[in-house]
Image (spheres, helix red, strand yellow):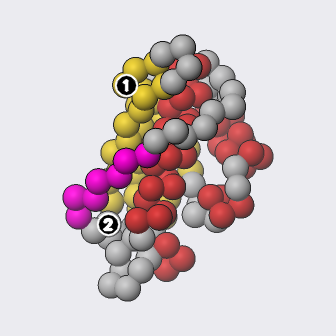
């Protein structure tokens, strides 16, 4: 299993600056998933104090990348082929937690899901 500190270092060294600007923190790594968190700041809020969908989708995509790394047993190149997002309500609070997990791992594709929770 990948250590949280190793995952956080990989994030800092390999992801785009605008992703890092969200303040992503890796809080959990498991055999088939990962949990990442971001603080809710004015930088990612839209009118009314709701977190913008772009930030939420980017957090989910990043968390699922780390779920893939967990399932593959290390950091290997991956690319998103499809991303479907459903917003059930507006996100407000202090933090967003995103728990991701691998649903199915094939030879060339890995299917994941992510659940975001505002706290």
- Measured along the vertical axis of the image, is residue 71 above or below residue 11? above
Crowd band around label 1 with a 10 angstrom C-alpha radius: few (<14), some (14–19), many (20+): few
Measuring 47% from the left and 64% from the top, which residue is drawn there? 54
Measuring 38% from the left and 42% from the top, which residue is drawn there? 114
Residue 9 on image: x %, y %: 72, 42
**51 or 26: which is nearer to us?**
51
Residue 99, quarter of picture: top left
Left or right side of 104 for 2: right
**Image quarter (top left, top right, bottom left or bottom right) of the C terminus:** bottom left
Measuring 28% from the left and 59% from the top, which residue is drawn there? 87
**15 or 29: which is nearer to us?**
15
> In the drawing, what numbered circle is on residue 91?
2
**115 or 5: which is nearer to us?**
115
Residue 61 on image: x %, y %: 50, 46
Crowd band around label 2 with a 10 angstrom C-alpha radius: few (<14), some (14–19), many (20+): many
In terms of secondary structure, where does tag 2 sit?
loop
Looking at the magenta stretch, what is its main secondary structure? loop
Residue 37 on image: x %, y %: 48, 52
Q: Is residue 31 visible?
A: no
Measuring 44% from the left and 76% from the top, which residue is drawn there? 45
Q: Is residue 86 highlighted in magenta?
A: yes
Spot the residue most to the top. Answer: 107
Q: CA distance from mark 2 to mark 1?
A: 25 Å
> In the drawing, what numbered circle is on residue 103?
1
The residue segment tinted magenta is 83-89
Sequence-wise first label, 2 or 1: 2
**Image quarter (top left, top right, bottom left or bottom right) of the N terminus:** top right
Q: Is residue 53 visible?
A: yes
Q: Is residue 18 highlighted in magenta?
A: no
Left or right side of 75 for 55: left
């Amino acid at each position: 299993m990948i250590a949280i500190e190793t995952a956080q270092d990989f994030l800092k060294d390999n992801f785009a600056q605008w992703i890092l600007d969200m303040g992503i923190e890796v809080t959990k790594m498991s055999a088939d998933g990962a949990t990442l968190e971001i603080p809710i700041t004015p930088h990612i809020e839209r009118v009314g104090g709701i977190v913008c969908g772009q930030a939420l989708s980017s957090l989910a995509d990043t968390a699922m990348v780390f779920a893939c790394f967990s399932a593959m047993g290390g950091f290997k190149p991956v690319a998103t082929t499809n991303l479907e997002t459903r917003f059930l309500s507006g996100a407000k609070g202090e933090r967003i937690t995103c728990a991701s997990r691998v649903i199915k791992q094939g030879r060339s594709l890995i299917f994941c899901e992510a659940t975001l929770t505002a706290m």
